Amino acid sequence: MKVLFFNPVGVIGRSERILLSTIAAIRSRRPGIEITLVVGSAGALIAAGESLGIQVICLSMPTSIAHLGDSHLKGKQHLVQLSKTLLTIAKLTPALLNYLKRLQHLIQRIQPDLIHSNGIKAHVLLGLLGRLNCPVIWHIQDFYSTRPIMARVLKGLSRSTSGAIALSHAVKQDAESLIKAPIQVIYPAIDSHYFRVEGVRSQVVRIGLVASFARWKGHDIFLQAAAQVMSDVPVQFQIVGAPICRTSGLQVSFAELQNQVKNLGLERVVEFVGFQPETASIYQNLDIIVHASTQPEPFGFVIAEAMAFGKAVIVTNTGGAAELITNQYDAIAVPPGDVAALVQALRQLIQNAQLRQELGQNARRSAIEKFNRDRMADELLQVYERWGGIEQALSVC
């Protein structure tokens, strides 16, 4: 059996981490399946894919197409910006048609039994090819309904897919208004090296927010709460992450956060750790991990990873993040943007080491059950069988 994965970029972001985890899960469960990964640009994903023992092909996408998108228009109704984006798309038609021709020839050469599409651009490009000689399954990892252009495009092209995999029930619910195909929820797997024992204990309670600097990640909420939980118990706050988006206005800057820290008198207790490509050591040295997002998350990798590490986690109770936990059993849930609720949860955990330990132990059990690789592989292979019509091929792999 041959499975072709198609990803529009060769760099490694959240979506690509899920992709690599998916491929690793299949390789572990069914090593006989022949996997080819096609990427649209150079990057670390190529070497990472090859390290899993699969063939990786770079079908370079024109820069103009690679940079095209409507994420900057999320939730907006600015007709001028929308018109400019549509005009840009029209100008790119010749380059788009040329790339589609190259992509079609490559698929014909590989002759896969099934195509696993990863990312909006991948869905669109494969959809524009029309009906192929094999089933196509979309992997949905974001809320598509907020995209003013792509939502309409995907709705029309969804007839070309056999089905879709959603990152969470929240993502599935959002996608059901657009995608005219069956959708199955499959939680991603967490890399096995995150399932570790707790780090060295310290007299100082270390509390961390691990997130990009997107404005909706709740850094301001985190810092406001930090200013209110200063007590006789020594505490240290860490902000792990950095600005990664180039779109103006969508993220907070270091300078803004540093000014807020200064205004709140937190200079001695707040540390900026910066972006960490490998976060395992970060989790190991924290006692409490805070998820403070003010908007719904499609999933919540930080939450799942922290749970796998057996840490006490405070989670904003909305979107996909809310599905990952059981309040007061393996985490504490708080309403989005509620500083008072976050302060209360922090005080509860700072003052009660036993509660932190109990929540962490339960969190680890939940993570092992929900986010292990074998579970993901089995659910994914069932989807391949059901929508791909390839039971016979799988049975001999």
Image (cartoon, grey):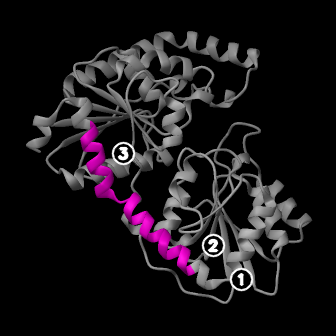
Above-or-below relation of 148 to 236: above
* Disc number for residue 351: 1
Q: Which amino acid does label 1 sit on?
A: Gln
Q: Residues within 10 Å of mark 1 (few under 14, many from 20)?
A: some
Badge 2 vs badge 3, beta-carbon distance below 8 Å: no
The answer to whether 238 appears left or right of 312 in the picture is right
What are the residue bounds of the magenta stretch?
357-383
The numbered mark, 2 or 3, whose residue comes first in the sequence reads 3
Q: Residues under labels 1 and 3: Cα distance?
A: 47 Å
Name the residue at the left extreme.
396
Which quadrant of the structure image shows residue 86? top right
Please provide percent x and percent y for residue 258.
82, 61
Above-or-below relation of 40 to 104: below
Which quadrant of the structure image shows residue 193? bottom left
Q: Can residue 47 be seen in this view?
A: no
Please provide percent x and percent y for residue 235.
74, 80
Badge 1 vs badge 3, beta-carbon distance below 8 Å: no
Q: What residue type is labelled 2?
A: Ile
Query: What residue is at 78 percent from the left and 56 percent from the top?
Result: 338
Above-or-below relation of 351 to 168: below
The answer to if 367 sits in the magenta stretch is yes
Eye-nearest disc, 2 or 3: 2
The answer to whether 270 appears left or right of 149 in the picture is right
The residue identified by callout 2 is: 288
The numbered mark, 2 or 1, whose residue comes first in the sequence reads 2
For the image, the number of numbered tags is 3
Q: Quick one: 341 or 51, which is closer to the camera?
A: 341
Eye-nearest disc, 1 or 3: 1
Q: Quick one: 275 or 238, which is closer to the camera?
A: 238
The residue identified by callout 3 is: 46
Q: Say what secondary structure mark 1 lies in.
A: loop
